[in-house]
Amino acid sequence: MAGAAVSAPPSARGPDAPAALLQVELDKAEGVKAGGMALLIAVGILPIFVLMRTVGGFVDRVAARPGVVAAVLGLSVVMFAIEATAWWTVRRETRAGRRLSRWPGRLLVALEAMAPTLVLVLIGAFLPGEHALTAPQLLLYAVFIGPSAVRLDPGLSLLSGVLAAGSYAVVAGALLSAGRVDHPLEQDLATHAMRVLYLLMTGGAAAFVAAQLRQRFTAALQASAERARVVHIFGRYLHDDVVDHLLHDPDGLRRGGERRTLTVMMTDLRGFSSLAEGLPPERVVALLNHYLGEMVPVVLENGGTIDEIIGDALLVIWNAPADQPDHARRGLRCAIGLQQRMAAVNAWTAAAGLPALEMGIGLHTGEAVVGNIGADQRQKYGVVGTTVNLAARVESATVGGQVLATAATLAQAGEGLQLGARRSLRPKGSAAPIEVAELLGLDGQRLPGADETLSPAPPQALRLRAVRGKELDAEAIEALLRAAGPRRLVVQLAAPQPEVDDVQIEHNGAVAYARLSPEGPDTALLRLTSAAGAAALRAAGLALPADPTTATH
């Protein structure tokens, strides 16, 4: 039965969670028990009322004195009212999320255990003693002792049995001592000793059932809590769909995989390795944790499965393990969201006295094998195939703040794409060049810096060196600045176009790197790979407009 509220239900996590959850359910069960007892009492007394009004002489045949029926009915009505009140109170408290005090419930169990004894006392007050000791109401002891097990408290069930046996022994002893028992069998103390023993055994049986059920329920709740803990822990490393697949699919842990069409996204921070070299390990970890803390929610919001976190890089897939017909569009939308979230990352780096970070993102859609990969001792849910390699190659062709997607991804993404320049890439190991385009916007979302414009600039001398692998050409190419934006330059070359994608720019001792796209026979568009490089050239006197995306950092 409910008493004062002692606390709100605890969290569903933590070492005490199973016990707390069990207690909440037991509180609710106590209300159900009280309601059930009220119903049983009503079912028990209703026929008596009906018979009294429909069968002539019923009371006289059942009992020599009508008072005994009225007394028993009165006691039954009182017990009904108590049980109904307990049901209503428990229901109100549990719905409000409050825990129940233990003592009112114990008092109710004690009252229920002795209720049959009170009935016997009333019968004995109006009829000969043997009527009380042999009345059908003796069976009520089992009716009231049994439900005490619903609290799953063995001590409470034992208490119910002891109180029932003790109160019966007191009534039987009083009637025998008063000489009100004439029946020879009922005058034998062994008869009553056996009844007392049976009542104790009933309480013991209820206690045994309560103990076993509590043990089983606690074990089940602990197993459920442990499973939830595992899902919570691995959910920090794997997408929820992957965890659910591994735990619920009968073949979830079998090695191997399936061939699926996936959209794969690779992200990488520009210049992070050189930045990390100048920082203590603790600051590097703090920086990575903050960066990933901003990125991961965006991935999950767009239904991506994080296959790998490789230092500062993310490998994300769509359309596995769950089917996602719009996987390409989800990937592109996520890429824009990630670039937009970099503003929050750089607000933190500025406050921490660190330089702004920039990220390049590449996406490709194609067939790959996805599933459990590894040995029996250690496995991972991952993806392998050329599609992954191509996504990584596309990402390597990006500059900071840019999103490049292959034609395969764009074709599956549908309408509403806002695209920039297109180009061909010939990734290492690829039999043919692949077409990529710069993503500028989707569904009303615009990429930061997508509206950058080029303005005519005074001619300034630059020196370019082609980057081939990790080597610079020894011979420099002279160039003149013709137009500029915060991160892009149009230059006129004094020599034929170099057949390379990457160049080094030198100006007044400052050095930066850029991606080169031919614009004409002797004209090229240079896109600076990082804000740091742009800042270095700007500081060296090159006429580059201020970058609004990094001006506050």
Image (cartoon, rainbow, N blue to C red):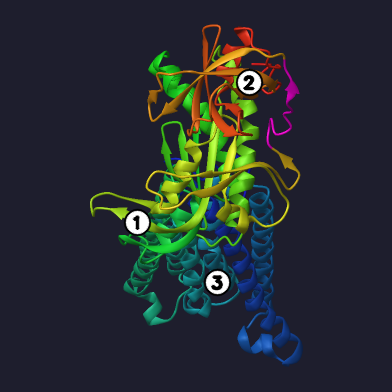
Give the crowd class for mark 3: few <14, some 14-19, many >=20 residues within 10 Å: many
SS class of the residue under badge 2?
A: helix
Residue 512 in the image, given as x and y percentages of width and height: 52, 18
Task: State yes or no: residue 84 in magenta.
Answer: no
What residue type is disc 2 on? Ala
Q: Earlier in the sequence, mark 1 or mark 2?
A: 2
Residue 278 in sight here: yes
Q: Residue 29: horizontal and vertical position, in percent?
A: 55, 60
Amino acid type at image mark 1: Asn
What's the mark number on residue 272? none
In this picture, residue 336 sits left or right of residue 211: right
Q: Residues within 10 Å of mark 1 (few under 14, many from 20)?
A: many
Q: Does residue 272 lie above or below 120 as drawn?
A: above
Residue drawn at x 59%, y 28% is: 527
Q: How many angstroms separate mark 1 from mark 2 (CA)?
A: 39 Å
What is the magenta range?
A: 447-457
Q: Which residue is mark 2?
A: 347
Disc number placed over residue 124 in the picture, else none: 3
Residue at 52% across, 7% down: 509
Q: Mark 1 or mark 3, which is nearer the start of the sequence?
A: 3
Question: What is the quadrant of the C terminus in the image?
Answer: top right
Q: Nearer the viewer, residue 369 or 35?
A: 369
Q: Is residue 484 above or below residue 89?
A: above
Q: Is residue 453 magenta?
A: yes
Report which residue position mark 1 lands on: 372
